[in-house]
Image: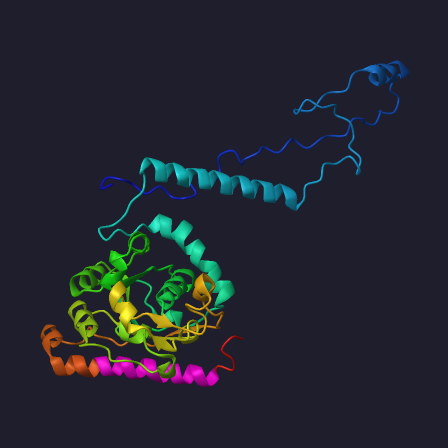
Amino acid sequence: MADAKVIPFDDDRSRGSAVQRPSRRRGAGSRRKSGEPARVREVQQVQPLPTSAAGQDDVPVTHEEQPFQGPQDGAGSGLERRVASGLAFLRRRLTGDYEIDDFGYDEELTDQVLMSLLRPLYDKYFRVDVKGIENIPAQGGALIVANHSGTLPLDGLMMQVAVHDHHPAGRHLRLLAADLVFVLPVVNELARKLGHTLACTEDAERLLAQGEVVGVMPEGFKGIGKPFSERYKLQRFGRGGFVSTALRQGTPIIPCSIVGAEEIYPMIGNAKTLARLLGFPYFPLTPTFPWLGPLGAVPLPTKWTIQFGEPIATDGYPPEAAEDPMLMFNLTDQVREQIQHTLYKLLVQRRSVFF
């Protein structure tokens, strides 16, 4: 896998789809010059007409006989290109002719498959509105810090689609996830393919040093597993490790506020004993789960808003600032307050949870 090479997805799009147009047909008859002998006219009348390059008689084509060239032709060629591209994609996957980075991120699979699976949930189900996407720099590292909620971490995935689909520079968001994500079968592989990595200082600094956009949700399980009665109330942001990381790399911190995720699974209870038996940080009880079985795991179709705030610069601090606990506390509190203030503002503007 180390020497694998990425081939652009649309390399084979033109194969089999470039159809040469037939040459324009000419009129069969021509005017006779005045004074031309009648015998010549008779010869011309019985002389076989020339054929076109396509092998058909070169006779005038009436309006009714002209082949129809409408949207169907373009749709057919578009379908051929998609089929050719899909086959080329499958060939690269089967032959291993693709590339992943040191963290397991598979950019081609993410762009062509995984994002396509998440996009209907983003566009049609949660109908996400995105604001302030221009606050994410077009190049270089940046650290996005967001609130966390919803019982299941769908908010991180929707934030990833928002950056991927709406940023003018087409940037990719690399999320820092809890260690529980990487011990679950299937989930572990999908998270790695999507570009997620362990929420630790070493991985975060490496990604930022490479100029990546990194996303972190400092509330962790305290935020995602809080009861419904405490919705949109930010929990503690830990010890400010994300601020220290941003200071060391000199990358801006971008606060992000997500409204709508709190109501997808209203958590009215927590079966703590069952959670300990299963090794989970909590076991949610909602109005539909586990009472309705698998149907209760379907999230409610709430209306979402994701707003990226103005960046907080960190490149003006000296190198030793990353070891200053008071500075880290102040910057952490500044980020938290900005996210909380934006949440309240968005909630005031929201007229309905679902519409």
Left or right for 152, reference 200? right
Residue 239 lies in the magenta stretch: no
Where residue 126 appears, x then y in whole percent?
Answer: 48, 68
Q: Nearer the viewer, residue 309 or 300?
A: 300
Q: Where, by quadrant of the figure, is residue 191 drawn?
A: bottom left
Residue 337 placed where, x, y %?
Answer: 29, 84
Quadrant hosting residue 287: bottom left
Q: Residue at x 45, y 72 (%)?
A: 304
Q: Main secondary structure of the magenta part?
A: helix
Q: Nearer the viewer, residue 77 or 345?
A: 345
Query: Percent x, y for residue 215?
Result: 29, 66
> Relative to 192, does residue 222 appear above or below in the rendering?
below
**What residue lies at 26% left-to-right and 51% top-to-bottom?**
104
Observer able to see residue 152? yes
Q: Is residue 42 left or right of residue 282?
A: right
**In the image, is residue 340 part of the stretch drawn in magenta?**
yes
Is 70 in front, or is 231? 231
**Rendered view: 180 above or below 348:** above
Residue range highlighted in magenta? 332-349
